């Protein structure tokens, strides 16, 4: 892992380690799994939390951190989060006619290709928004 500062945030619900998280709308300094592809992902959890009275360490942009994958992805390819904070591939379109949906990408698979669900691999975390095909 890189030496980017780790922040501590409150939790909305039970969260697992090595998952992408987004801020909770209307609740200060609190994170949850992204509710949709349009939620801006702010970090990767570094530990698990089992109740809602605790806080969780989260690494931010510029970090290389381990993430739990829910699909196969080729090394060097961009990833996004599913609604459980797990990494999945993101399809980017090269044409303007099929680009319709705004989606938050989370980063690039920095480690070896992921061939199976449940694999944990390194991701360079550099979130942003793209327009993806339907």
Image: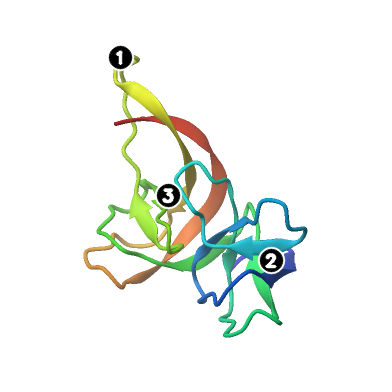
Q: Name the residue under label 1.
A: 97
Q: Is residue 99 visible?
A: yes
How packed mark 2 is, by other alpha carbons closer than 10 Å (few <14, some 14-19, many 20 or more), is few
Q: In this view, does 120 lie to the left or right of 45?
A: left
Marks 3 and 2, Cα distance to the nearest angstrom?
23 Å
Residue 72, by quadrant, is bottom left
**Residue at image location 40% in from the left, 30% down from the top:** 101
Determine which of the numbered discs, if any, sits on residue 3 in the image. 2
Label pair 1/3, CB-CB below 8 angstroms: no
Q: Which of 66 and 117 is in front in this view?
A: 117
On-image quarter of the C terminus = top left
Farthest bottom residue? 50
Asked which secondary structure carries label 3, the reply is strand
Disc 1, SS:
loop
- How far apart are labels 1 and 2 at the CA level? 41 Å
Q: Nearer the viewer, residue 42 or 15?
A: 15
Q: Position of residue 50 (x, y in %)?
A: 57, 85
Answer few, some or many: residues within 10 Å of disc 3's Cα (few below 14, many 20 plus, some between 14 and 19).
many
Q: Which of 118 and 1 is in front in this view?
A: 118
List the residue tagged with mark 3: 80
CA gap, disc 1 and disc 3: 22 Å
Q: Does residue 4 appear in this view?
A: no
């Amino acid at each position: 892992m890189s030496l980017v500062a780790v922040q501590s945030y409150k939790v909305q619900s039970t969260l697992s380690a090595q998952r992408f998280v987004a801020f909770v709308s209307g609740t200060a300094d609190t994170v949850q799994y992204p509710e949709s592809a349009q939620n801006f992902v702010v970090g990767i959890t570094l530990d698990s939390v089992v109740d809602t009275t605790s806080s969780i360490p989260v690494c931010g942009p510029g970090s290389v951190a381990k993430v739990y994958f829910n699909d196969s992805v080729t090394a060097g390819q961009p990833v996004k989060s599913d609604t459980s904070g797990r990494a999945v591939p993101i399809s980017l379109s090269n044409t303007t006619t099929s680009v319709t949906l705004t989606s938050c990408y989370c980063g690039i698979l920095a480690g070896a290709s992921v061939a199976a669900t449940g694999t944990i691999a390194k991701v360079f975390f550099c979130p942003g928004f793209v327009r993806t095909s339907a």
